Amino acid sequence: MTHTFEASTASKVGRAVPHGKRPFEADLARRVLNRHMRRCAAGTMLVLEGEECRVAYIVRSGWLAISKTLEDGERQIVDFILPGDLVDIADEHRNACPVQVEALTLADIAVLPLREWKQLQTDDPAIADLNRKYSVAILGRFAHSMLRLGKGSAETRIAFALMELCVRLTAMGEVRNGRFHLPITQQHLGDFTGLSAVHVCRTLRRLARQAVLTCEDHTDIIIHDMDALAQLAGIDADQLEREVVPDAIGT
Amino acid sequence: MTHTFEASTASKVGRAVPHGKRPFEADLARRVLNRHMRRCAAGTMLVLEGEECRVAYIVRSGWLAISKTLEDGERQIVDFILPGDLVDIADEHRNACPVQVEALTLADIAVLPLREWKQLQTDDPAIADLNRKYSVAILGRFAHSMLRLGKGSAETRIAFALMELCVRLTAMGEVRNGRFHLPITQQHLGDFTGLSAVHVCRTLRRLARQAVLTCEDHTDIIIHDMDALAQLAGIDADQLEREVVPDAIGT
DNA sequence: CGGAACCTTGAGAGTAATCAACCCCCGTGG
DNA sequence: CCACGGGGGTTGATTACTCTCAAGGTTCCG
């Protein structure tokens, strides 16, 4: 039973609310969360499209994906969920969830029944506030993604996806010298950017040839020239952080 | 002063909550809304990207677009706002809105300061509930749009866009025999589907040649074969309604 | 050692963008 | 009344980007 909500995660999550308030670190929240921890293998489906969903997820470790599938099987990843993130897509008023949620890596997740999750927000206004920030951040990410999907070239989309992940991981303290771990395949990146895995590969190689970034061990990304990447993505890194990272909202 | 929130609109909006509850028809709501009515010419920018936004909009008549622009000027329409819809993108915690809101046609809009909007929700739980439904609907529309933008062909995207609008307009009673008014240019449709205006035109003509639909007067669409359109869009019309129309959520 | 999953690269095909010309409709002003 | 201009829409020709198919490479693991 190693996967409880103790120090390491609590401090990481706590960073989401910098100025002294750390909702998920509060005794109450930690106790509730620990009661619902669950470990999921990579590939586990947490919510299937069209099935009902009456729980909220708070991720302690591992990456999740929220995705949606076309009738012919083509899949679009709508959002990546990183450690410390909150997934609140449940809707008590309907019995069919419009999206799918799956674990991309081994993941430790608190699975909160909707009632307890609401209670937690009622009991601790800071948690309600955090929830609002996550909603705002996800809307920001959606708008950005739609813009790139609709009007961006392959280079723009890849550059943007990497910048978004880099900015979010930076806020979690997971980036050192422009280097971060990317525990997903090129296929996943393609499902997120609307490109084929083959073209993701080509685009990454082209960026590497331009000395913008390097891929290492197929699992790490090192960004050498953030300005060039921002130029390709068509966004300023600071602005992106404000619009996409819950930690940066309202501070 | 013709643009007050009286019978015609109130009943249309009221349809959003079928079972006897009609929040925007209640005396209180109507009085507050009428105090803030504003008429906007086509092309009016209500919110600029990057500027602060401290108001909510409730549309009485006319179409709006929520859009986002790339540095090179390419624009993506993220969502269309129809009569009776609610736009609540304001965030009291930051001073830069991530998207732009503009009137596509002449429009009558209630512009509610955030404080009054919140008060209204506090005073009338039915309005708070309505707000939640609109949030859920917009998320559903975003997920669908992202899927089509990422993985759909031009035909799929156009078919989906028309189906979404048809379904939403049907819920408002604005569709008769598959025919509805589309007060936007092909350029707008292109900005929404991520296609060039030229290719929107070609695709519409192809659909017309296949007898799926007809365009009339450049402003009306008549859908002859909804099943074929649904097939192309990759979605069932009933399912789409449940996921995209606030009226249909939680009923 | 064999297999599986993923990455890489090349060649060819297909889709949508761009450029360009023309049309139509409509409002304006001579 | 008509000439004019502007905004959309339509169509064709050409270009460019991305997909698909295919083959081979690497790493990891049973």
Image: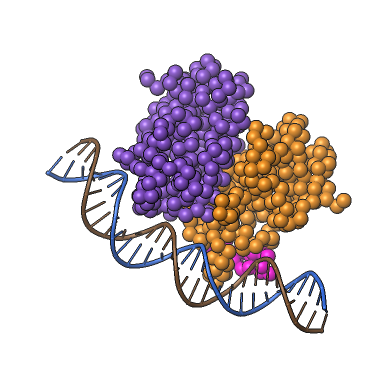
Chain colours: A purple, B orange, C blue, D brown
Residue B217 part of the magenta-drawn span = yes
Q: Is residue A25 left or right of residue B162?
A: left
Quarter of the image where one finds residue A239: top right
Q: Position of residue B197 (x, y in %)?
A: 58, 64
**Residue under the image location 45 percent in, 37 percent down:** A166
Q: Is residue A226 visible?
A: yes
Residue at the (47%, 21%) spot, across then down: A11
State the residue lying farthest toward the right. Answer: B1
Q: Quadrant of residue B57?
A: top right
Q: Is residue D17 left or right of residue A16?
A: left
For the C terminus of chain B, which image quadrant?
top right
Compare residues A23 and B218 and report the one nearer the observer: A23
Residue range in magenta is B212-230
Question: Residue B120 colored magenta?
Answer: no
Is B192 left or right of D1, judged from the image as shown?
left
Which x, y percent locates residue A48? 46, 40
Q: List x then y, in percent, for residue B177.
A: 66, 63
Residue lying farthest to the top in this orientation? A27
Q: Is residue B2 above or below residue D4?
A: above
From the viewer's perspective, is residue A193 above or below residue A52?
below
